[in-house]
Image (tube, grey):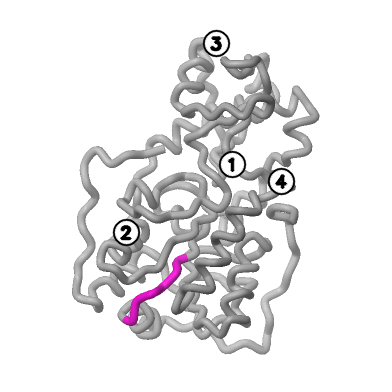
């Protein structure tokens, strides 16, 4: 079970066109038991770019693979230099209307669960309680030798002390928190070992080419089987880590609804695909259901 292989696909031409009608989404949520599957597209309105779609970062950025990270010390230096800088941008990100809508749906008892492919913890910052982080979270670090977990903020402090004056200007930030830096900008950035055993540190996220923990996958499969319907938010479903849950929902004859402006690899399994910006769409749905979205709270927890 390889994680997030890069896939090539062409949108099917025999599918009905996308719609702007939100009534099926509002009806599904009104009936309750909806399982949300969210992708990078829900965080773009918070300033975190998508991998795909217009301006997607895959056009300029090849994500780090697990194999490269574990085998190559220079690759780890590049990764940690870029990730250390990108972490600052993630730390400034705030939940947008899409995240707040999902939290409101949960709070009103309309959801059976949330699965997110994102590593930014913006669902939790918006108030969602039961989000399963399919690909992990950037706010934790794990030692590959002793298995010790530690807060990312702690490592960020250590890296700042070890690399005084490191403050290059990045060409961009990617959904995995990796900033675009040249080798010259990376320079002789100092990578730090585990403070417990001296082993290699890695963010607690599933890299491309890495395996999603089987128990996490099975938990998500159970959520799909127990749900009344599946609502996909902001995911192209290009990679199997998310698409498998859409396929499972279809096999279990659960209605699949998708809100994504671009075609997705799961469209043939969907009852409808709504081609609207997520923040506006979910705000409208919340209004139809009779509860306005809360305004962003001051001092929300962030990555």
Residue that carries the numbered disc 4 in the rendered image: 210
Quadrant of the rendering where the N terminus is positioned: bottom right
Q: CA distance from mark 2 to mark 4?
A: 29 Å
Q: Is residue 234 visible from the viewing direction of this image?
A: yes
User: Magenta segment, which residues?
Assistant: 31-36
Return the residue nearer the eye: 87 or 251: 251
Disc 1 to disc 3: CB gap under 8 Å: no
In the displayed structure image, the side of residue 25 where residue 4 appears, left or right? right
Quadrant of the rendering where the C terminus is positioned: top left
Residue 162 tag number: 3
Q: Nearer the viewer, mark 3 or mark 2?
A: 2
Q: Nearer the viewer, mark 3 or mark 4?
A: 4
Disc 2 to disc 1: CB gap under 8 Å: no
Is disc 4 surrounded by few (<14), some (14 to 19) or many (20+) residues within 10 Å?
some
Q: Earlier in the sequence, mark 2 or mark 1?
A: 2
Q: Which of the 4 quarters of the picture holds residue 277?
A: bottom left
Residue that carries the numbered disc 1 in the rendered image: 205
Is 218 colored magenta in this rendering? no
Q: CA distance from mark 2 to mark 1?
A: 23 Å
Q: CA distance from mark 3 to mark 2?
A: 39 Å
Q: How many marks?
A: 4
Residue drawn at the location 54% of the way across and 67% of the way down: 222
Residue that carries the numbered disc 2 in the rendered image: 103
Q: Earlier in the sequence, mark 1 or mark 3?
A: 3
Q: Earlier in the sequence, mark 1 or mark 4?
A: 1
Q: Is residue 297 above or below residue 223?
A: above
Q: Which of the 4 quarters of the picture holds residue 147?
A: top right
Q: Earlier in the sequence, mark 2 or mark 4?
A: 2
Residue drawn at the location 60% of the way across and 25% of the way down: 81
Q: Secondary structure at mark 4?
A: loop
Residue drawn at the location 32% of the way across and 59% of the way down: 103
x and y percentages locating residue 288 in the rendered image: 25, 78
């Amino acid at each position: 079970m390889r994680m997030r292989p890069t896939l090539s696909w062409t949108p099917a031409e025999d599918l009905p066109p996308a719609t702007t009608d939100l009534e099926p989404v509002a009806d599904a949520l009104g009936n309750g038991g909806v399982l949300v599957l969210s992708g990078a597209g829900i965080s773009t309105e918070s300033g975190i770019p998508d991998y795909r779609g217009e301006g997607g970062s895959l056009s300029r950025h090849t994500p780090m693979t697990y194999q490269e990270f574990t085998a190559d010390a220079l690759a780890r230096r590049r990764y940690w230099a870029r990730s250390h800088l990108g972490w600052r941008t993630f730390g400034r990100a705030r939940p947008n209307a899409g995240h707040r809508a999902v939290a409101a749906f949960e709070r009103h008892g309309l959801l059976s669960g949330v699965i997110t492919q994102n590593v930014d913890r913006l669902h939790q910052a918006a108030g969602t309680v039961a989000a399963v982080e399919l690909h992990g979270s950037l706010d934790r670090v794990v030692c590959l030798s002793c298995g010790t977990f530690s807060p990312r903020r702690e490592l960020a402090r250590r890296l700042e002390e070890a690399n005084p004056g490191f403050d290059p200007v990045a060409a961009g930030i990617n959904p995995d928190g990796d900033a675009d830096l040249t080798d010259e900008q990376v320079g002789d950035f100092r990578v730090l070992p585990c403070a417990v055993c001296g082993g290699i540190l890695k963010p607690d996220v599933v890299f491309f080419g890495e395996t999603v923990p089987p128990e996490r996958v099975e938990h998500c499969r159970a959520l799909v089987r127990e749900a009344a319907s599946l609502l996909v938010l902001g995911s192209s479903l290009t990679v199997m880590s998310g698409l498998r849950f859409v396929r499972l929902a279809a096999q279990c004859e659960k209605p699949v609804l998708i809100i994504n402006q671009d075609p997705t690899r799961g469209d043939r399994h969907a009852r409808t695909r709504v081609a609207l910006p997520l923040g506006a769409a979910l705000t409208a749905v919340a209004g139809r259901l009779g509860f306005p979205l809360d305004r962003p709270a001051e001092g929300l927890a962030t990555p």
